[in-house]
Amino acid sequence: MARQIAFDAAEARQGLLGLVVAVLEVVQELLKAQAIRRMRSGSLSGEALERVGRALLELEGVLEDFKREQGLHEAVDSVRHGLDGLADRLLEPVADAEGWN
Amino acid sequence: MELKPSPAAAYLYVALAALAAGSDPDLEATLSALGVPADPEATGALAHLLHRLADTGGRPAASAEAPGPQEPSDGMGTDAACYLYGVVEDDGTRLPVWTGVAGHVVVGVRAGGLMALAHACPAQPFASDDRDTALRWVEEHAAVLDQALERYPALVPLRFNTLVGGTDGPAARAVRDWLLREAPTLRAHLDRVRRRREYAVRFRPASPDPGVAAPETGEAGPGTAYLLRGRREMEEAGFRRSRAAELAEACLAEVRAAAEDVVVERLTGEDPAVLLRCACLVADDRVGDFRAAMGRIAVVHGLVVEITGPWPGYSFMPRVGTEGADGPPATDEEFPGGRP
């Protein structure tokens, strides 16, 4: 019985962490898209661009490390898979905002 | 060794050498090497003679045009047709000795202040089953135009296998008639391309290969490089495809602003590797600015730009009629310059 509960608890923990990391990933990607958009429009450049890029790079690294340490890849992927449509809908207007006209 | 022949001996030597070589000697250079000052009248006459000899001997041999203000003698002999390379303005100077297609020597046929670069030939177009031979001819045609482009401020290039003249008389007469008849069109085009040349510009999406793309990031720090990489990935992920047309239009508008004239060859389309391909007419003294502008457009839109040229202004040619031409006016297969 205790085993069963422990197992469920581990699964729940994985699921929750996976959800959190997935959301953080989406946020990181939104920020990245925003930074890229501003880079393209020229409103972000030089030192500021480098600083933002480095922060995003570090965040990505931290999330990646965390996923690996906690064995979260599968959990995150399943959340992301479910979120894909939503993430695309979130990302699209951001990427659309100015860039291409 | 100091050997200084008499002028007569030097001319004889040059003539024999040219006949022996059967190719295109630089008469003036050879004479000056022999220490004999080249007399334009004499070299012109000699070139003319050599060409006549070559005609009768059936072997393509050395010749240069013989300038004659009163009686145009262009070494056309009695051949049935003239193969035309292009048209320049007659500046009254001698045409350098250029070898054209299949060893023919290019002569200038002058009329009404214009000069056609031509060679005499039978009234039939060049044709060969051998691809390499055909390719070589096209390259030889392009080489003459390249030299003319360097030598003259304005040039109307004609396509490979442009023939003028029928079987009813000296071909040079037909070329002169053609020059006079087409003079307004030819002059308008010469004015349009004077001291301007054509450049082929191709924009394509930045390569997904980081090895190739690396130079773009230059000395950017890791953060900037990360965002540049992200931008590339984003573009590859389909943003580019859906926005390609808009992007190409935006590029094109900027290209138009930087060039004097633009002919669009391709605006996006089936090949996703090419976003925009166009021919640009650029003034010779603005080439630096033009190249810089293309570079800027590429950077701003995250593209790679390739510029080739200068080319003869093929893309900006008017429709020039060559009635009386025997055979097809051109091979429509490819750009005669073998443009990449």
Image (spheres, grey):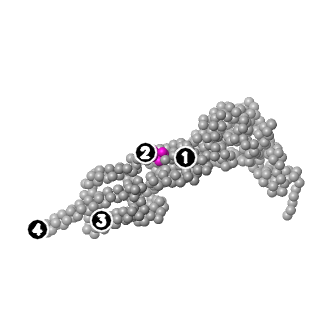
The nearer-to-camera label among 1 and 3 is 1
> Same subunit under labels 1 and 4?
no
| Left or right, residue B285 beside residue A6 | right
Q: Numbered disc 4: what chain? A: A
Nearer to the camera, B80 or B14: B14
Instruction: Tell me the element at label 4.
Output: loop
- The residue mark sitting in front, 1 or 4, is 1
Mark 1 falls within which chain? B
Q: Which residue is mark 3?
A: A63
Q: Are marks 1 and 3 on the same chain?
A: no
User: Mark 1 or mark 2: which comes first in sequence?
Assistant: 2
| Amino acid under disc 3 | Leu
Marked residue nearer the N-terminal end (4 or 3): 4
Q: Is residue B335 visible?
A: yes
- Tell me residue B22's x, y (percent): 77, 49
Q: Chain of mark 2?
A: B
The residue labelled by disc 1 is B259
Q: Secondary structure at mark 3?
A: helix
Instruction: Name the kind of residue labelled 2 in the image.
Output: Ala
Q: CA distance from mark 1 to mark 3?
A: 49 Å
Callouts 2 and 3 close, C-beta under 8 Å: no
Closer to the camera: disc 4 or disc 3? 3
Q: Quadrant of residue B302?
A: bottom left
Q: Which mark is residue A1?
A: 4
Which label sits in the foreground, 4 or 2? 2
Q: Is residue B244 magenta?
A: no
Task: State left or right for residue B216 relative to residue A58.
Answer: right
* Alpha carbons under labels 4 and 3: distance apart: 34 Å
Q: Residue at x 52, y 52 (%)?
A: B293
